[in-house]
Amino acid sequence: MTDSHTPTFERFGFSSALLRAIERRGYEHPTAIQQEAIPPILNGDDVLGCAQTGTGKTAAFALPAIEKLTSAELTPEHQLRVLVLAPTRELAVQINDCFEAYSQHTSVRQTVIHGGVGANPQIQRLRKGMDVVVATPGRLLDLLEQGHLSLQTVELLVVDEADMMLDMGFIDDVTKIINLASNRNQTLLFSATLPPEVQSIADNWLDNPKTITVVPDAIPIHLINQSVFFVENINKDLLLIQYLFATPRARTLVFVRTKKDAERVAGNINRVKLEALPLHGNKSQGRRRKAIAAFRSEQAPILVATDVAARGLDFDNISHVINYALPEYPEYYIHRVGRTGRAGAKGEAISLCASHERYYLKQIETLADISIAVREWNFDDFGSFPQLERASQRRRKRKPDDQEAMETDAEQATSDPSWVRGKRKKKKKKKKRQSRVITMDDIKSPSQQSGATGKYAPKKRSLD
Ligand code: AMP
């Protein structure tokens, strides 16, 4: 039951068309960022919002933007009045989808502009007139330079994920775009973290902004079982794969540092017949879309992603988050693990921490005010793991001299260059692909097998 103190969307004075869309979306109450950001945005103030994905920040700016557009007559030619900048294509598409859903009972028109696909359909849509454009900076600048749109009519400018824009080197492009939108009367800047660079950008671009912070407290970090394994880089792939086999899990998100790591780690996971897809900025738009769709539909249960590629993507029902590498910024850790344990469900987050990453671990523990449990992994418990056995046998055949230097089977497996670096010859790879799919039953001890449901067994499938 709603009592008089429970915040509602009605209290913002939204139009009935907007309230209907909100109800249809299933939102009952505004989230913390929405409660704090919507009134000043409606009031015309600049806002600096420090909020991460999952807090409802998209609606926090999209709902008042639509309300402002519809409270006055829309121009007959649907002049561009609201511009949203996002760092990645996926995020831009996601934001545009939100605008579409929230404005479904109004005549607001919106479109999304991003690279990686042909520009013509985007140009055609712009010609029809769009009240809202959600764009990534590169393609927007291309179309601006070619004269396909002008930012002179933009009233409200939103820069989303500003810290990611900085990380991705978009800052010059964003600055150009902001300068082109010189007639705007309101600027909103959202960022998951507020490093000094973002703060100084905010100082330059925003006029006396209201600052709103809803991280990291809003993330129920106490609902997440967190632990760390101290393991050097050379053994991380092996530990990860053994862990994936040994752990009953639903959707699993593995965070890596670089695009190369994403490819290699996903490749190694696939090599043992667990289905993983890499997600990073070098993938074509089509492949990224397929990877996201496959992960969302649980066809591909493991996604190996960089922070940049996964940022802003709204996935729910993630049972496990694995930090293959610890993030440089402690806030990123909170954003990563915050993707599990949502909606009151107990999530699991593990981190693989090499000695050079202990400093990052300390920073995380300080920021989140937690002490992450240290766990030991016994590689030898997985001696009957067929693929890894075969990898180490191949290595023994090829490099008998090196064998003596190795202490355990596990170390032998990881030190196989074809295993760790994924340089196995194509012919051999094809042969392996034909081998039987390994299920959880294959790796569970007899005592565990009675409870095995097979639910988490990897499915044999191909994506492309
Ligand atoms: P965001 O932080 O914008 O990526 O939103 C995260 C998720 O929260 C999305 O699935 C939204 O649809 C959902 N959401 C946003 N606002 C609300 C709300 N007031 N109540 C429930 N869910 C919401």
Image (cartoon, rainbow, N blue to C red):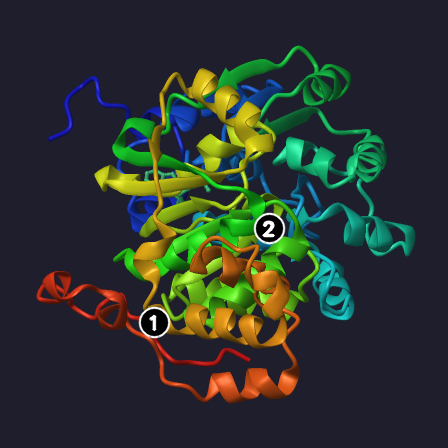
Q: Is tag 1's residue or tag 2's residue first in the polypeptide sequence?
A: 2
Is 193 on the left or on the right of 323, as rendered?
Answer: right
The residue lying toward the viewer, choosing from 2 and 337, is 337
Image quarter in which the C terminus is found:
bottom right
Ligand 1 visible in quadrant: top left
Badge 1: residue crowd in 10 Å (few <14, some 14–19, many ≥20)? many
Q: Position of residue 289 (x, y in %)?
A: 56, 65
Residue named by callout 2:
309
Q: Against 436, is 156 above or below?
A: above
- Horizontal and vertical percent for residue 388? 44, 68
Question: Quick one: SS at disc 2?
Answer: helix
Residue 264 percent location from the top left of the image: 61, 61
Amino acid, disc 1:
Pro
Instruction: Judge depth for marks 1 and 2 and give the one in front.
Output: 1
Residue under label 1, please give it: 458
Secondary-structure class at tag 1: loop
Whether residue 404 can be seen here: yes
Q: Quadrant of the N terminus?
A: top left
Residue drawn at 22 percent across, 64 percent down: 444
Residue 247 occupies which quadrant of the picture? bottom left
Q: Nearer the viewer, residue 260 or 352?
A: 352
Work out whether residue 261 or residue 35 is closer to the camera in this orientation and state it.
261
The kind of residue on which mark 2 rests is Ala
Q: Give the number of marks.
A: 2
Distance CA(mark 1)–CA(mark 2): 24 Å
